[in-house]
Image (cartoon, rainbow, N blue to C red):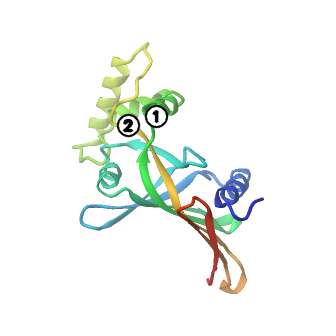
Amino acid sequence: MDENNPLNIFESWFKQAKQSDIDKPNAMTLATTDKQGEVHARIVLLSSFDSNGFVFHTNYQSDKGLQLAANPSACLLFWWDCLGYQVRINGQISKTTAAESDAYFNGRPRGSQIGAWASEQSRVIKSRRVLDDRAAEFETKYSGKTVPRPDHWGGYRLSPDKMEFWLNLENRLHERTLYTRQKSGSWLRNILAP
């Protein structure tokens, strides 16, 4: 494994996490900031990753979507407790292409596709019944049809500028390795004190 390329290390750790007993190894914390500089964090699911970055999908009109529109700088955090692995990834967010979003949406379960239409994510609703009624409305609308991807739903890609790998060791003398992307595209590797 090339220790000078953090994406290779992430791939190795993620593979181990998927082979472990972790229920959702693709669960990650996404941290964003709003226009006032207040930090917000929530769990989202990693859809895919490659040399271009880390992809997740959501409603563009959700709180996180509005925050990313105002400030595309974000942080992802993975914590795989049983392995003692933590990965922190900072970078810039951009939307995936419509074709990429369509391809992912078309592979989702039908109920999740209907949910993307029914949920006005992050908005106050009067009751749960409002959501259930909207889901029933869209289920009827698309009965016997392919559910198209809503324009307000799609993918985001975080292109990493920094990646930190943290390995849990005894006596709190953990191993921390920070990779910082250089202008040339290569990565600078530094060992950090725990």
Give the image quarter of residue 72: bottom left
Horizontal arrangement in the rendering, residue 85 relative to residue 39 (left or right): right
Mark number for residue 153? 2
Would residue 95 be found to the left or right of residue 119 on screen?
right
Above or below: residue 43 compared with residue 153? below
Q: Residue furthest left?
A: 126
Left of 48 or right of it: where is 4? right
Q: Which residue is mark 1?
A: 101
**Residue in the picture at 25% in, 61% down:** 35
Task: Give the vertical position of 62 relative to 160 (above or below).
Answer: above
Which residue extends farthest top?
144
Secondary structure beneath dot 1 equals: helix
Quarter of the rendering containing residue 8? bottom right
Q: Residue at x 31, y 55 (%)?
A: 67
Seen at 62% across and 84% down, the residue is 193
Q: Position of residue 38 (x, y in %)?
A: 30, 67
Q: CA distance from mark 1 to mark 2?
A: 8 Å
> Where is residue 115 shown, x and y percent of the image?
39, 34
Outermost residue toward the front? 184
Direction bottom: furthest residue: 171
Q: Are marks 1 and 2 in contact (CB under 8 Å)?
A: yes
Which residue is depicted at the point 51% across and 33% down?
A: 104
Whole-percent x and y of residue 3?
73, 64
Q: Is residue 39 above or below residue 20?
A: below
Along the viewing direction, whichever of 180 and 106 lies nearer the viewer: 180
